[in-house]
Image: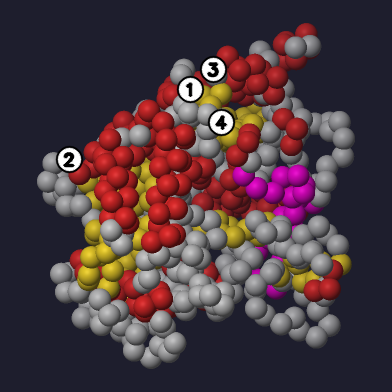
Amino acid sequence: MPPQLKAEMNVMPKVVQGDLESLSPEARDFIETNAKLCQPECIHICDGSEEENKKLLDIMVEQGMIKKLNKYENCWLALTDPRDVARIESKTVIITQEQRDTTPIPKSGTSQLGRWMSEEDFEKAFNTRFPGCMQGRTMYVIPFSMGPIGSPLSKIGIELTDSPYVVASMRIMTRMGTDVLKALGNGEFVKCLHSVGCPLPLKEPLVNNWPCNPELTLIAHLPDRREIISFGSGYGGNSLLGKKCFALRIASRLAKEEGWLAEHMLILGITNPEGKKKYFAAAFPSACGKTNLAMMNPSLPGWKIECVGDDIAWMKFDEQGNLRAINPENGFFGVAPGTSVKTNPNAIKTIFKNTIFTNVAETSDGGVYWEGIDEPLPAGVTVTSWKNKDWTPDNGEPCAHPNSRFCSPARQCPIMDPAWESPEGVPIEGIIFGGRRPAGKIIMHDPFAMRPFFGYNFGKYLAHWLSMAHRPAAKLPRIFHVNWFRKDSQGKFLWPGFGENSRVLEWMFNRIEGKASAKPTAIGYIPTDAALNLKGLEDVNLTELFDISKEFWEKEVEEIKQYFEVQVNADLPYEIERELLALEMRIKQL
């Protein structure tokens, strides 16, 4: 380290907003230690106010980092450096004393269930990145609550960042500001440190005025220290540290220790025509219609769907044995391409005010555009792609990045559930697992949709799920599996999907009530021929839809066995092994 930098690291930057003295000793120490290390020009303690947000948006416009979208109310467009557009699993690590605390030790090859880094290697990586990394920039202090402020199910974090984009986005995605500091008092919090890794003056010009440092990007989780440390990326999944980093990776470890569940699941409420309501949680991997299901307009008359959350669920059994769930987030960070009035009308009604769009295309009339938006362009309106180039459909490449996003307040969704911010959470009576596999059922290797987000050893995670059955007085929710994506021999979908999925939810609802009939099969109970309400639907071939191919399932069982044997190895719970053997026997009898 240069002598000048060593000397500067003893200097405390000035505080331009907020009062360090009003914070708890632990919070103050966290801020001061990292401020001396990262050497920002000044420190700004965020209050979460509208006035503060407006100033930050103005700063980003001035820097050329975002631009106002004049077609909508308070909407903004950010175009990133093309090297910084998504989560990077290869650079996302968990640091524990032993590798087996993070991932099972595979029988051969490398683990597909997370990336471990030793404490020694992390210290070296940290020390080559963070000293002086915020020079010339403002360090923003973001106090945030995952979940409603004051809820017994919520957790608090403090993120230090040199990115105003992160501050503006965290204000949408979390409860953020002065109220959180009041609720925190002298309590515990998760420590989050983030830098774009571009101290000023710049050594080389920015692309799209987007600061990042792709060569040195690292997103590290230290569960034993309750810390998240991210460097080099400004993209949401790597920089909004309350999201996947805290709400899944760190929270899943906290949940294991404290006896609850932190899951990559939507939460929805469904009300039948008689006014009776039930809540479901559901896990779907990417591109499997998760947000569409959470915001569905049901096709069945008299049924109502309401959204509690579209991405993450924290669930804990209460004293009466009910599984209670909260959505720890405060906004939607959704993939834009494919979102349209047809696929998700409620998302479309949500996202065109108070929203930050990232890497979508821009129209010449101040709007946004992407693949699958299903809206014709007005005459004379042109499109500029996310790469800041003129675009037409004949270009041969997408106008919006496939992972382009909208970041919108959840309260704007027209079907948010009245209890979505209930401190005690909503009672979960059913859990749905789903995926995309045209020939068979679901993606069995990742039914929890958690593979990129485990905070600890997957084998121990399975054991933790199984332990829930032994909670005192636990009323276990019913478990369902779905696959909306089965195809016939001509490659056509066997099920219409979207709002028609409410017919499947109706069967699940009635099944929990003890009213819907089902028949046993080798892979579980399926609706009897008359149990699924198909009124008004044409050309649904139930025989083909519910066909269980012996050939497919024999291969599937073999693949699952191989996966567990190689990847989970000695950490596979006995109960899972036993269930797999029982499944294998049932398939043989088909």
Which residue carries the number 3 mark?
119
Q: Amino acid at mark 1?
A: Gln
| Tag 4 and tag 3, C-beta contact below 8 Å | no
Q: State the separation of the CA atoms marked 1 and 3.
A: 10 Å
Instruction: Specify whether residue 80 is painted magenta.
Output: yes
Q: Is residue 482 left or right of residue 377?
A: left
Q: Counting residues from the N terminus, which is met first, the one under dot 4 or under dot 2?
A: 4
Q: Amino acid at mark 4?
A: Thr
Q: Residue at x 71, y 82 (%)?
A: 376
Q: Is residue 505 above or below residue 161?
A: below
| Mark 2 neighbour class, 10 Å CA radius: few under 14, some 14 to 19, many 20 or more | few
State the extent of the magenta-drawn residues as a range.
63-87
Q: Which mark is residue 99?
A: 1
Q: Is residue 315 above or below residue 419?
A: above
Q: Nearer the viewer, mark 1 or mark 4?
A: 4
Quarter of the image that includes the N terminus: top right
Q: Which mark is residue 110?
A: 4
- Label 1's element? helix
Q: Residue at x 59, y 35 (%)?
A: 92
Which residue carries the number 2 mark?
470
Q: Nearer the viewer, mark 2 or mark 3?
A: 2
